[in-house]
Image (tube, rainbow, N blue to C red):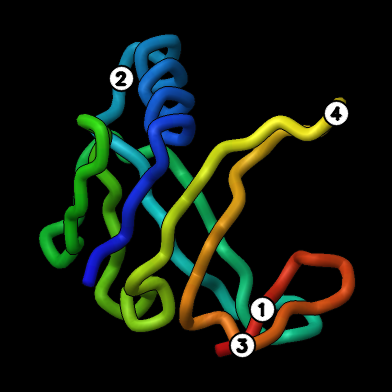
Amino acid sequence: MAVTLTQQAADHVGRYLQKRGKGVGLRLGVRTTGCSGLAYKLEYVDAPAAEDQVFESFGVKVFIDPKSLAYLDGTELDYAREGLNEGFKFSNPNEKASCGCGESFTV
């Protein structure tokens, strides 16, 4: 499988990287935290790690470490605006449940 970005997410990341003036893509990973056990983490990548898996959508590269890939395989990352709120939304087929506050999930 793969990890993909929607057109909206790719456009947002591309604009940010251009505004930032450096970077080769976006790193998506998971960390242990919260009520349900795992939380998504995002950061911009200036230099990929040797062990990274690389996926590309709409010209934007997504870097994922091998440990996180087990939890993220098949995920689609979207960027949406809802009223005054905007941000990334994760559609992860591995996610079995999430906490009430929406900060963490379990597989």
Using the numbered discs, state the Cα–Cα distance from disc 3 to disc 2 in whole angstroms: 36 Å
Residue picked out by circle 4: 83
State the quadrant of the C terminus: bottom right
Q: Position of residue 97 (x, y in %)?
A: 69, 85
Label placed on residue 22: 2
For badge 4, the amino acid type reads Gly
Residue 54 appears in which quarter of the rendering? Answer: bottom left
User: Is the residue 88 above or below the residue 104 in the image?
Assistant: above
Q: Counting residues from the N terminus, which is met first, the one under dot 1 or under dot 2?
A: 2
Closest to the camera, between mark 4 and mark 1, is 4
Residue at 41% from the left image edge and 24% from the top image edge: 11
Q: Position of residue 21 (x, y in %)?
A: 34, 12
Residue picked out by circle 3: 96
Dot 3 and dot 1 residues touching (CB under 8 Å): yes
Q: Counting residues from the N terminus, which is met first, the one under dot 4 or under dot 3?
A: 4
Q: Position of residue 26 (x, y in %)?
A: 36, 42
Closest to the camera, between mark 2 and mark 4, is 4
Question: Viewer-proximal residue, 85 or 63?
Answer: 85
